[in-house]
């Protein structure tokens, strides 16, 4: 543990283990998203709780993809991804894409109403919004690839409430 002073306060820094890290990250509320892509072998997707904006000018998004996630190869092959923000009440779909329902690969897309976007990435009808991105860069670190994509198209459903994940559970 090391200490430091910040504006007159003594701040303690502890070593962090993986369990504590996830507990701390879970303290932020996030809109639940599904990251999707499609190549010649079909659609792929995963629960994207680490999807966020990078800049507004140009419009860039960032997604973190574990190297064990099969959708990573599809994203690379296709050169695109879409971020689909789930609406309130879509917990079952989030669990399917999060690997909690025992359904994997293309079989996940049998659930939900999917349409191809302008990039070819699957878009969820009824999503709060979807951002279609062309991959501009990737960066590999610690078993994760960070994909940076330029937003090239979007859909928006302003009257729809989002599904929110906070402290390890979906908010009502």
Image (cartoon, rainbow, N blue to C red):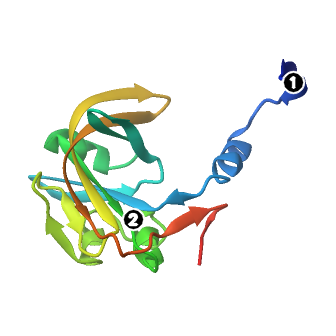
Image vertical order of residue 33 relative to residue 77, above or below: below
x and y percentages locating residue 58 in the rendered image = 26, 33
Q: Position of residue 52 (x, y in %)?
A: 42, 45
Residue 121, by quadrant, is: bottom left
Mark 2 or 1, closer to the camera:
1
Residue 75 appears in the rendering: yes
Could you tell which of marks 2 and 1 lies nearer the N-terminus? 1
Give me the disc on residue 1.
Answer: 1
**Mark 1, secondary structure of its residue:** loop
Q: Nearer the viewer, residue 35 or 161?
A: 161
Of residue 154 and residue 25, the one placed in the foreground of this image is 154
Is residue 157 placed above or below 41 in the rendered structure? below
Label 2 CA crowd tier, 10 Å (few <14, some 14–19, many 20+): many
Label of residue 97 in the image:
2
| Snapshot quadrant of residue 127 | bottom left
Q: Residue at x 75, y 34 (%)?
A: 16
Q: For residue 18, which quarter of the picture? A: top right
Residue 76 is left or right of residue 128, and the answer is left
The disc at residue 95 is: none
Q: CA distance from mark 2 to mark 1?
A: 38 Å
Q: Residues within 10 Å of mark 1 (few under 14, many from 20)?
A: few
| Pick the front one: 162 or 16 | 162
């Amino acid at each position: 543990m090391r200490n430091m002073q910040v504006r007159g306060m003594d701040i303690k820094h502890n070593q962090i283990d993986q369990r504590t890290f996830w507990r701390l990250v879970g303290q932020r509320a996030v809109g639940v998203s599904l990251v999707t892509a499609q190549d010649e072998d079909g659609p792929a997707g995963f629960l994207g709780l680490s999807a966020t904006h990078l800049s507004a000018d140009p419009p860039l998004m960032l997604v973190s993809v574990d190297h064990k996630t099969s959708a990573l190869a599809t994203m690379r092959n296709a050169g695109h991804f879409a971020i689909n923000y789930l609406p309130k009440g879509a917990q079952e779909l989030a669990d399917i894409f999060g690997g909690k329902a025992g359904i994997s690969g293309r079989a996940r897309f049998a659930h939900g109403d999917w349409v191809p976007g302008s990039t070819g990435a699957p878009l969820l009808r009824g999503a709060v919004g979807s951002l279609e991105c062309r991959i501009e860069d990737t960066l590999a670190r610690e078993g994760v690839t960070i994909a940076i994509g330029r937003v090239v198209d979007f859909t928006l459903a302003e009257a729809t409430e989002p599904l929110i994940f906070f402290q390890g559970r979906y908010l009502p």
